[in-house]
Amino acid sequence: MATNITIIETQRARTSAPAATAATPSRKLPGWLWFIALWCLGVAAAMSLGFAFRLLMNATLFAVR
């Protein structure tokens, strides 16, 4: 069962699209920079989670004594 897809473009949309993209420069980051940014974010999240766990463990261990 196939669905036919029809794309309808108007003359105004076709002429304004390149002008809009030329006015706003693309700010796409390279893939390796995304990898480093997400890796740093993951390390920071893991360290903050570990610090919170350490505080929780210290609080409960001192409460038991």
Image: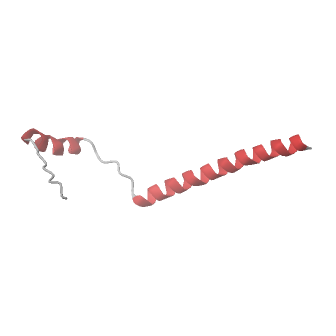
Task: Determine the residue located farthest toward the bottom in the rendered image.
Answer: 32
Tell me the quarter of the picture where residue 16 sits. Answer: top left
Q: Position of residue 2 (x, y in %)?
A: 18, 58
Q: Nearer the viewer, residue 48 or 3?
A: 3
Q: Position of residue 24 (x, y in %)?
A: 27, 42
Could you tell me how many numbered marks the image carries?
Answer: 0
Q: Nearer the viewer, residue 49 or 64?
A: 64
Location of residue 20 with respect to 36 vertically, above or below? above
Could you tell me which residue is drawn at 50 percent across and 53 percent down?
A: 37
Q: Nearer the viewer, residue 8 or 24?
A: 8
The reply, left or right, for residue 39 in relation to residue 56 is left
Task: Determine the residue located farthest toward the front in the rendered image.
Answer: 1
Could you tell me which residue is drawn at 17 percent across and 43 percent down?
A: 17
Task: Determine the residue located farthest toward the right in the rendered image.
Answer: 65
Could you tell me which residue is drawn at 39 percent across and 57 percent down?
A: 30
Q: Position of residue 34 (x, y in %)?
A: 45, 55
Q: Position of residue 64 (x, y in %)?
A: 89, 43
Q: How is the image coloured?
A: secondary structure
Could you tell me which residue is drawn at 22 percent across and 44 percent down?
A: 21
Task: Determine the residue located farthest toward the left in the rendered image.
Answer: 11
Tell me the quarter of the picture where residue 59 sits. Answer: top right
Picture quarter with the C terminus: top right
Picture quarter with the N terminus: bottom left
